[in-house]
Amino acid sequence: MSSEATPNLVVRSISSIELYQFCELLMEAASWFESRGEPLWKFHQITPHSLLANHRLDEMYMGYIAGKPVAAMILNNRSGAIEVEAEVRRESLFMHKLTVNRDFAGKGLAKLMVDWARCYALNQGFTLLSLICNCRDERLRWTLSQFGFDEVEQLNAQYQLQRYFCLDLDSCSVPLENMPVESIGFEFTGLNEVKPVLG
């Protein structure tokens, strides 16, 4: 991937005044998936009020190019509504609501966001990066496999099929993008919690 395709992507946790921009990115993605007949998130789940009720501000990250927010994700140590095995819960940094602005789709930004999260998770002592995404979209599932994620399907307590994606940080064969750290803007700040000993 050339640096011209994704110039100076900087990933950092958002400030309170950036919350609406964060929500706009999620709303745009939700609208796009819904227009394809494959709703990903309910709109009431991605309003500022709903996000703040379920996530701390320093768990919400945006990727910026030339100061413009172009990608978003949530990182924390909780699996949310998806039931995961105890070992996965203990060892994972969880990624939620990974999205890229449609104007920047196909330029490799999702991969760079995942790469940033991989480096962050390793830096924090996690061994897994788990993406909570119960999607049915075949293209998205294939893309995630190209990033190194393994798809996990299981039945929850109500016998409903649930899906999430898990990337083993120690044995992932997909290389990080060959870009200098400074050009991606790695800032290991925010998410200041230590890794939990128990899930």
Image (cartoon, grey):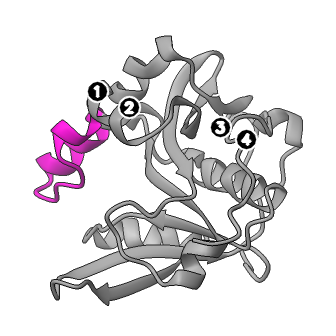
**Near-viewer residue (28 or 162):** 162
Q: How busy is the neighbourhood of tag 2: few (under 14 within 10 Å), some, or many (20 plus)? A: few
Q: Is residue 158 above or below residue 164?
A: below
Secondary structure beneath label 1: helix
The foreground one among 145 and 93 is 93
In the rendered image, which residue does mark 3 sit on? 5
Secondary structure, mark 2, is helix
**Crowd tier of the residue under label 3, counting other residues whose Cα lies within 10 Å: few below 14, some 14–19, many 20 or above:** few
How far across and how far down the image is residue 21, in percent?
41, 20
Q: Marks 3 and 4, Cα distance to the nearest angstrom?
A: 31 Å
| Residue, disc 2 | 52
Amino acid on which the number 4 mark rests in the picture: Asn
Q: Is residue 159 left or right of residue 26?
A: left
Q: Could you tell me if the residues under marks 2 and 1 are in contact, i.e. CB atoms within 8 Å?
A: yes
Q: What's the CA distance linking mark 4 and mark 1?
A: 23 Å
**Depicted 119 relative to depicted 50: above or below:** below
Q: Quote the CA–CA distance across marks 2 and 3.
A: 33 Å
- Report which quarter residue 152 is drawn in: bottom left
Task: Check if mark 3's residue and mark 1's residue have beta carbons within 8 Å.
Answer: no
Please state which amino acid type lies under the numbered disc 2: Leu
In the picture, the disc for residue 49 is 1
The stretch of residues the image draws in magenta is 27-46
SS of the residue under disc 3 = loop
Q: Quadrant of the C terminus?
A: bottom right
